Amino acid sequence: MKGKPPEHTKFPKGQSGNPNGRPKKLPALDLIMANVMGQEKDGITAAEAIIMKLREQAAKGDIKAAQLLLDRAYGKSKQNIDITTQGEKVTVPTIIFTKDKANE
């Protein structure tokens, strides 16, 4: 079905289709996380303790721990994903725009 919806299915002017709006996120979850991760024990924050534990696991050969640390520190590596051509090569035309000096 293309075009505008039928008049009888439209909301009256001034009435929202979602009167309660978007649901609120959990109460200040970002602040709670910052507070919890910043808590210190023996002079080390929770965030530092987690990172040190990941480092320890990575040094013992835990590939997932190493990958998580490296991804967070340096970003994930680029991955080429072909979702349209099923592996077949596709020639993509290149369009070059030039300034037409005759119409200046």
Image (tube, rainbow, N blue to C red):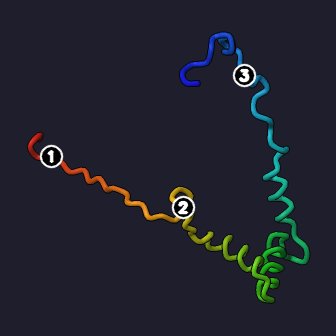
Number of labels in the image equals 3
- Residue flagged by tag 2: what amino acid is it? Gln
Q: Nearer the viewer, residue 85 or 43?
A: 85
Q: Is residue 34 above or below residue 100?
A: below
Callouts 1 and 3 close, C-beta under 8 Å? no
Question: Which of the 4 quarters of the picture holds residue 7?
Answer: top right
Single out the residue that lies furthest toward the right: 41
* Residue 17: assigned label: 3
Q: Quick one: quadrant of the N terminus? A: top right
* Nearer-N-terminus badge (2/1): 2
| Secondary structure beneath label 3 | loop
Q: In the image, residue 40 lies at what x, y percent?
A: 87, 70
68 relative position to 88: left or right: right
Callouts 2 and 3 close, C-beta under 8 Å? no
Residue at image coords 42%, 60%: 90
Q: Nearer the viewer, mark 2 or mark 1?
A: 2
Q: In the image, residue 65 lies at what x, y percent?
A: 77, 77
Q: In the image, residue 30 lies at what x, y percent?
A: 78, 52
Question: Which of the 4 quarters of the picture holds residue 33?
Answer: bottom right
Mark 2 crowd level (few <14, some 14–19, many ≥20, 10 Å Cα): few
Q: Nearer the viewer, residue 102 or 43?
A: 102
Determine which residue is flagged by label 2: 86
Inter-mark Cα distance, 1 to 3: 51 Å
Q: In the image, residue 77 lies at what x, y percent?
A: 59, 72
Residue at image coords 54%, 67%: 80
| Secondary structure beneath label 1 | loop
* Residue 100: assigned label: 1
* Nearer-N-terminus badge (2/3): 3
